[in-house]
Amino acid sequence: MSQDLWTKVDDYINGVAVGTDAALEAASAAAAAAQLPPISVTPAHGKLLHLLVRAQGAKRILEVGTLAGYSTIWLARAVPPGGRVITLEANPMHADIARANIERAGLTGRIELRLGDALATLPKLAAEKQPPFDFTFIDADRTNLAEYFDWAVRLSHPGSVIIVDNVVRKGSVIDASSDDPNVKGVRRFNDRLTADTRVTATMVQTVSAKGYDGFAMALVL
Ligand code: SAH
Ligand code: DHB
Ligand code: MG
């Protein structure tokens, strides 16, 4: 079992489940050309988000961490007419590339990109009395993961779904003595998740072209 095999199988799965997709491929190419980190969700994981949104009938989506808008495009394509994705991004360069990718995908009318630190934007969304979000994808820095999740729950309603990316991090999540701020951030989130009576949750390990990782899924009660 090796990264080489995981990548080959990932390529195969992406071919079976997604195939060619001009807007998504253009978004990936623009991200690569701008030398953004290659950390967008994989095609198959993007489609998983898309299918979860459709299966749930979610109309209002919140995303924390836009990067080049690759996952944002998958999410926005899943909402019905009148649906909306609000996506939060701190890096202006990432936001510019995402806006161009979203425009090229014909989704500008459905997506609202809020530039700024999500730790500041999330309380603003609450203060604005935004209608609750049906579905949230958290995929930004891990140090503040527990806070992002707490806001996501507060901005949800019973029945909302929250997906949190990168909660396994090559297995390092089980290292209680790790000094890595990302690992500490994920562990702090996981510890709180167990005790959080507002949700019921699980975690799924994944392997892909991006390595060994996993995501958490929470249902708001
Ligand atoms: N969801 C994207 C990938 C996001 S990568 C996809 O799958 O296509 C993580 C992004 O979170 C980066 O663009 C980074 O700039 C952003 N980010 C990091 N810290 C942040 C913060 N505090 N507030 C908002 N965005 C942040
Ligand atoms: C990293 C971030 C991600 O969101 C991801 O899916 C994979 C890796 C990272 O920062 O290393
Ligand atoms: Mg991620």
Image (cartoon, grey):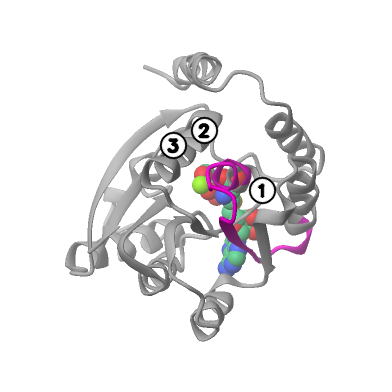
Cα gap from disc 3 to disc 2, whole angstroms: 21 Å
Q: In the rendered structure, which segment of residues is drawn in magenta?
A: 73-93
Which residue is pictured at 67% across the width and 62% down the height? 112
The amino acid at mark 2 is Lys
Relative to 89, say whether 78 is above or below.
Answer: above
Residue 164 appears left or right of 116: left
| Drawn side of residue 14 relative to residue 212, left or right | right
The residue wearing badge 1 is: 69
Query: How far is the residue under mark 1 from the one under mark 2?
Result: 17 Å
Q: Residue at x 49, y 39 (%)?
A: 50
Tell me: residue 188, above or below residue 10.
below
Task: State left or right for residue 187 relative to residue 185.
Answer: left
Mark 1 beta carbon near ligand 1 (under 8 Å): yes
For residue 179: magenta? no
Residue bearing the label numbered 3: 51
Foreground residue among 133 and 170: 133
The disc at residue 210 is 2
Question: Percent from the top left, x then y, of residue 174?
Answer: 26, 49
209 vs 174, nearest the viewer: 209
Amino acid marked by disc 3: Leu
Residue 79 covered by magenta stretch: yes
Between marks 1 and 2 in the image, the one whose residue lies nearer the viewer:
1
Identify the element where label 1 is drawn.
loop
Q: Are marks 1 and 2 in contact (CB under 8 Å)?
A: no
Residue at mark 2: C-beta within 8 A of ligand 2: yes
Badge 3 element: helix
